[in-house]
Image: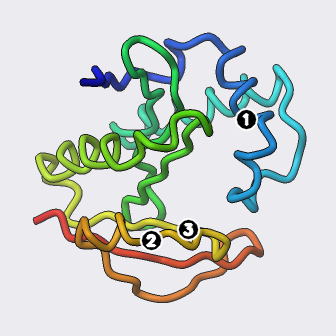
Amino acid sequence: MTDLHFVRLTEVPAADILGHMRDPRVAEHMPLLSMPWTEETVAAFVAAKDACWTRDGLGHWAFLADGTYVGWGGFQKEGDEWDFGLVLRPDHFGLGVKIAKKALDFARKDARIPYVTFLLPPSRRRLGALRRMGAQQVGDILYEGNRFLKFRLETR
């Protein structure tokens, strides 16, 4: 049984995030990942995600499995919607459903989140787990010039 913990991104070593985001397998499904990651990029990324906690009272976490950093993700306010993102280290892709379920349990208990959206690049072909959780595709959108498949999951 894997022990999962969610902590703020500020609580994990920047080197862990840097190594994760430099892995070319991560970039395969991240069309917005257009620049090389550096120590400065990580610092700006962590600061931006931490600012969401200050602004919205919710944001992104670092995911720990048995104490080891396995990725990051969480909720980000996009207009009036809460979008959920999940970016795992390739050697921990198998934890995606378990982490998503734990995060969605959190969302179901938060009165601010009547539903969650997911934006996935068209390169993502395996969508069965998302659909089994109850998410419905609601269309395609352009985000920063890139096409994404948009899904919605009711939390009430």
For mark 3, what is the residue? 120
Q: Which residue is drawn at 73% across and 69% down?
A: 144
Which is more N-terminal, label 1 or label 3? 1
Instruction: Say which residue appears at 86% left-offset and 26% top-offset.
Output: 38
Q: Residue 84, how many percent across, how many down?
A: 42, 55
- Seen in the image, is 121 located left or right of residue 152? right
Q: Tag 2 or tag 3, which sits nearer the N-term?
A: 3
Look at discs 1 and 2 and give the one toward the viewer.
2
Residue under label 1, please give it.
21
* Circle 1: residue type: Met
Cα–Cα gap, marks 3 and 2:
9 Å
Q: How many numbered discs, if any?
A: 3
Q: Quadrant of residue 90?
A: top right
Please determine whether, in this image, residue 90 is positioned above or below residue 33: above
Residue 127 got which mark?
A: 2
Helix, strand or loop at mark 2: loop
> Which amino acid, mark 3?
Leu
